Image (cartoon, rainbow, N blue to C red):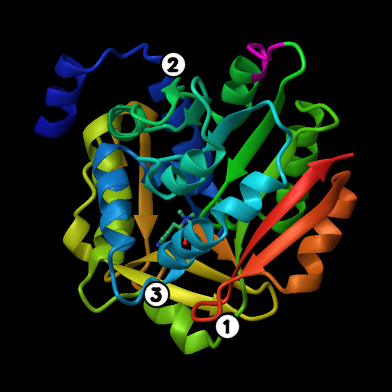
């Protein structure tokens, strides 16, 4: 056992359910011919902070486009909502983009349920937004959080669910549809979904957004191996891997990979797993699907939503979509 693994076993509860699930996913993912790790594991506290830093990069226009649309059209959006509404946000992070809309909706006791895997981000969210809404943070998965929030529906009240930042793009296209159907199933007619989707643009522009010269996205990606070291007693040498971003044209998605610089072996104590890498072999860590406008309306249709409105940013092609449960 390496010293790291020993330190791990002394500091973390070995029977922790979340850890076991992580270990199990790592075992399965790294046994595949194309090794892969689920992108949700990028967001531990350090990963969430690094993602926050990504949103400030000049090359990563996505978050600013999302925020511009929400700021410019907050009144339009608020005007299209049912009169009595509570707000749920999936993957809120610190909830910074949401302020404008919450303000436009207004009211004395607007309830806001931010759902996120990062407790730190939610604590900041609550702190920053409690002047304009009654904040009920939920550290849960999206659908578990949905169940918790919708259980608090009051008579005559509707929900607005916000799914911003093109997080829907992290799902494989068929899984995205399945997820939207599950989401729809947790809602009632009259409820609405505000969903942000990043649009296909010039490959060079997309690539540099996911491979910034400052190296923040690389750090964000490499942290996944650091997290395995910390939480699962791994011994990955982070310097022997490099960040890689690819534009997959047929699938219309950016993929992030971690590429092994050499032939090497890593051991992960908690997964009782030895993994070997050939030089140049990669672990696929994230997909960010990019959308074409017509396919968005098709997704709404197929998940039993109707399209109420859509706003597009002229500087960074990105679409904010307001769908209603039908
Ligand atoms: C938070 C999922 C929208 O896919 O663009 C940013 C995550 N990954 N840079 C995205 C991310 C690399 C981001 N989302």
**Secondary structure of the residue carrying numbered label 3:** helix
Residue at 86 percent across and 31 percent down: it is 189
**Residue 301, how many percent across, how many down?**
89, 53
Determine which quarter of the picture holds residue 55.
bottom left
Q: Which residue is mark 2?
A: 17
| Mark 3 in CB contact with mark 1 (< 8 angstroms) | no
Q: Which residues are magenta?
A: 150-154
Q: Is residue 132 magenta?
A: no
Find out whether the residues at labels 2 and 1 contact each other: C-beta distance under 8 Å.
Answer: no
Q: Which residue is mark 1?
A: 201
Q: Is 262 on the left or on the right of 141, as rendered?
A: left
Say which residue appears at 44% left-offset and 16% top-offset.
17
Badge number at residue 209: 3
How many labels were placed on the picture? 3
Label 2 vs label 1: CA separation?
Answer: 41 Å
The image shows residue 98 at horizontal and vertical percentages of 46, 44
In the rendered structure, which disc, 3 or 1, sits on the residue that comes first in sequence?
1
In which quadrant is the C terminus drawn?
top right
Distance from label 3 to label 1 (Cα)? 11 Å
- Assess disc 1: are there few (<14), some (14-19) or many (≥20) residues with their C-alpha within 10 Å of its C-alpha: some
Tell me if residue 152 is in the magenta stretch.
yes
């Amino acid at each position: 056992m390496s010293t790291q693994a020993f330190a791990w076993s002394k500091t973390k509860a070995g029977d922790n359910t979340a850890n076991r699930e992580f270990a199990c996913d790592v075992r399965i993912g790294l046994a595949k011919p194309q090794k892969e790790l689920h992108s949700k594991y990028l967001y531990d506290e350090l990963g969430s902070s690094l993602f926050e830093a990504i949103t400030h990069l000049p090359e990563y226009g996505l978050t600013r486009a999302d925020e511009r649309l929400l700021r410019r059209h907050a009144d339009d959006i608020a005007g299209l909502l049912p009169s009595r509404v509570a707000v749920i946000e999936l993957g809120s992070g610190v909830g910074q983009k949401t302020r404008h809309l919450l303000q436009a909706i207004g009211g004395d006791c607007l309830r806001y349920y931010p759902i996120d895997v990062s407790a730190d981000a939610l604590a900041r969210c609550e702190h920053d937004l409690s002047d304009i809404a009654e904040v009920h943070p939920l550290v849960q998965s999206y659908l578990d959080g949905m169940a918790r929030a919708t259980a608090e529906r009051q008579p005559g009240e509707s929900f607005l669910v916000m799914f911003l930042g093109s997080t829907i793009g992290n799902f494989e296209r068929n899984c995205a549809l399945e997820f939207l159907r599950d989401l729809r199933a947790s809602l009632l007619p009259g409820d609405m979904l505000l969903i942000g989707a990043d649009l296909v643009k010039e490959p060079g522009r997309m690539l540099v957004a996911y491979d910034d010269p400052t190296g923040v996205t690389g750090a964000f990606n490499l942290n996944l191996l650091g997290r395995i070291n910390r939480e699962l007693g791994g011994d990955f040498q982070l310097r022997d891997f490099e960040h890689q971003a690819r534009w997959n044209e047929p699938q219309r998605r950016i993929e992030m990979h971690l590429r092994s610089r050499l032939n090497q072996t890593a051991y992960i104590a908690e997964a009782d797993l030895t993994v070997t890498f050939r030089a140049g072999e990669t672990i696929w860590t994230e997909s960010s699907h990019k959308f074409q406008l017509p396919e968005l309306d098709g997704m709404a249709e197929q998940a039993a939503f109707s399209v109420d409105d859509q706003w597009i940013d002229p500087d960074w092609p990105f679409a904010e979509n307001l769908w209603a449960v039908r």
